[in-house]
Amino acid sequence: MLIRELQLGKRGITDNFINSVKREFNKADIVKISVLKSARREEIKSFSEEIVKKLKEDYGVRIIGFKIILRKRRGFKLRK
């Protein structure tokens, strides 16, 4: 299982940042995004919601401290 790390800077969530997250998911199963230490808990939660919304796919999100941890959810196929 590969884990990649990115940093969310003071410019916030831009199209370029979203493209970087998508590129990292091509290489890894989990992406950890570090948020600036000056961010409040509510801001980090809104950042995570905005990132998932802009990715337009199903991701599991977990916030630990100043990190947003994204994991792509895999679809399950039913057997016949």
Image (cartoon, rainbow, N blue to C red):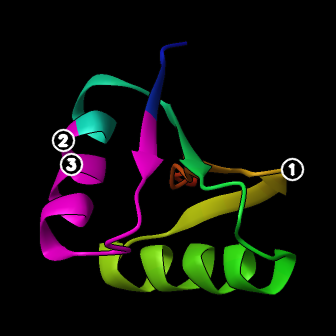
Residue 23 in the image: above or below residue 61: above
Quarter of the rendering occupied by the N terminus = top right
Residue 68, position as x, y percentages in the image: 66, 54
**Residue segment shown in magenta:** 6-23
Looking at the picture, which amino acid does disc 1 mark?
A: Gly
Res 79 visible? no
Q: Earlier in the sequence, mark 2 or mark 1?
A: 2
Q: Which residue is mark 1?
A: 65
- Foreground mark, 1 or 3? 1
Q: Nearer the viewer, residue 62 or 42?
A: 42
Q: Earlier in the sequence, mark 1 or mark 3?
A: 3
Q: Secondary structure at mark 3?
A: helix
Residue 40, position as x, y percentages in the image: 80, 76
Residue 52, position as x, y percentages in the image: 48, 75
Looking at the picture, which amino acid does disc 3 mark?
A: Ser
Badge 3, how many Cα within 10 Å: few under 14, some, many 20+?
A: few
Q: Which residue is mark 3?
A: 20
Residue pictured at 44% horizontal, 74% vertical: 51
Q: Would you say residue 51 sits in the magenta stretch?
A: no
- On the picture, is 67 further left or further right than 56? right
Q: Nearer the viewer, residue 2 or 42?
A: 42
Q: Would you say residue 12 sits in the magenta stretch?
A: yes
Q: Which residue is mark 2?
A: 23
Q: Secondary structure at mark 2?
A: helix
Looking at the picture, which amino acid does disc 2 mark?
A: Arg
- Marks 2/1: CA distance? 24 Å
Are the residues tagged 3 and 2 within 8 Å (C-beta)?
Answer: yes
